[in-house]
Image (cartoon, grey):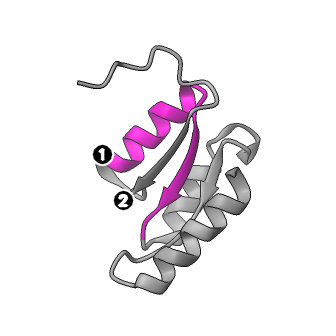
Amino acid sequence: MNRPFRDWHAQRVWIVGASSGIGAALAQALLARGARVALSARRADALAQLAGTAVKNEAALVLPLDLGDTAAFAAALDRLERNWG
């Protein structure tokens, strides 16, 4: 088993399916605990709204994509690596 994180501050997490439901709730919870969260889903408008709740928008990175599109996934991964290393 993985050890549980006690401190999420500055941890980086990529959530696919973050536009609604459990994904959005998880993103909000992690952002509230200080994590940096990459938000992905097909609905860019919903991701932007969720990111707007992040402190100064610095903790959230919006990466809209459809996982069925291989090129879109590769582009999102490239952008994530350029932004977060």
Q: Which residue is mark 1?
A: 22
Residue found farthest to the left: 1
Q: Residue 37 location in percent, x, y?
A: 55, 45
Towards the viewer: 70 or 47: 70
Where 32 sits versus 53, above or below?
above
Q: Give the amino acid at mark 2.
A: Gly
Could you tell me which secondary element the residue under label 2 belongs to?
loop
Q: Residue 29 location in percent, x, y?
A: 45, 31
Q: Which residues are magenta?
A: 23-41
Label 2 packing within 10 angstroms: few (<14), some (14-19), many (20+): many
Q: Which residue is mark 2?
A: 17
Towards the viewer: 77 or 59: 77
**Earlier-in-chain disc, 1 versus 2:** 2
Q: Give the amino acid at mark 1.
A: Ile
Membership of 24 in magenta stretch? yes
Could you tell me which secondary element the residue under label 1 belongs to?
helix
The reply to whether callout 1 and callout 2 are in contact (CB within 8 Å) is: yes
Membership of 37 in magenta stretch? yes
Where 17 sits versus 28, above or below?
below
Towards the viewer: 34 or 24: 34
Alpha-carbon span between mark 1 and mark 2: 8 Å
